[in-house]
Amino acid sequence: MIYAIKNENESNEKLVLRYKKLFFQSRITNKIRNERYAVKKPTKKKRREAAIIREAYRDLNQKVYF
């Protein structure tokens, strides 16, 4: 459960923004969306494709450009 208690001298808008930040950081929305529909486990081929793509992105992020 997520909640935000209003601090002194805090506007309602700030309270709502702080609550939304806590809510989305908790990833509850992702869990709810993922459980909404039944999804089959990915096949070996799909897992391998995802791993190759992931590896390519990691290689791009590790390169340092001067």
Image: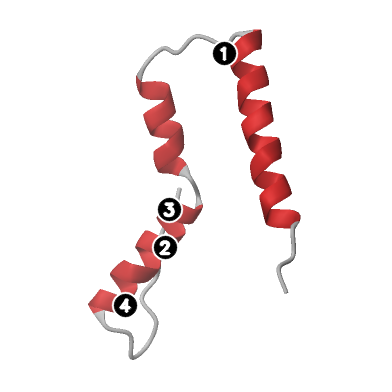
Residue highlighted by disc 2: 21
Q: Residues within 10 Å of mark 2 (few under 14, many from 20)?
A: few
Q: Please name the amino acid that badge 3 sits on.
A: Phe
Of circles 3 and 4, the one toward us is: 3
The answer to whether marks 4 and 2 mark residues whose Cβ atoms lie closer than 8 Å is no
* Picture residue at 36% right of the left edge, 60% below the top: 20
The answer to whether marks 3 and 2 mark residues whose Cβ atoms lie closer than 8 Å is yes
Comparing 30 with 57, the one in front is 57
Q: Position of residue 55 (x, y in %)?
A: 71, 37
Q: Mark 3 and mark 2: span between their CA atoms? A: 5 Å
Q: Mark 2 and mark 1: span between their CA atoms? A: 31 Å
Q: Earlier in the sequence, mark 4 or mark 2?
A: 4
Q: Mark 4 and mark 1: span between their CA atoms? A: 41 Å
Q: Mark 3 and mark 1: span between their CA atoms? A: 26 Å
Residue highlighted by disc 3: 24
Dot 2: element: helix
Q: Position of residue 32 (x, y in %)?
A: 39, 32
Dot 1: element: loop
Please say if 62 is above or below 66: above
Q: Please name the amino acid that badge 4 sits on.
A: Lys
Please say if 64 is above or below 27: below
Q: Mark 4 and mark 2: span between their CA atoms? A: 11 Å
Rendering quarter of residue 64: bottom right
Q: Residues within 10 Å of mark 1 (few under 14, many from 20)?
A: few
* Picture residue at 68% right of the left edge, 29% below the top: 52
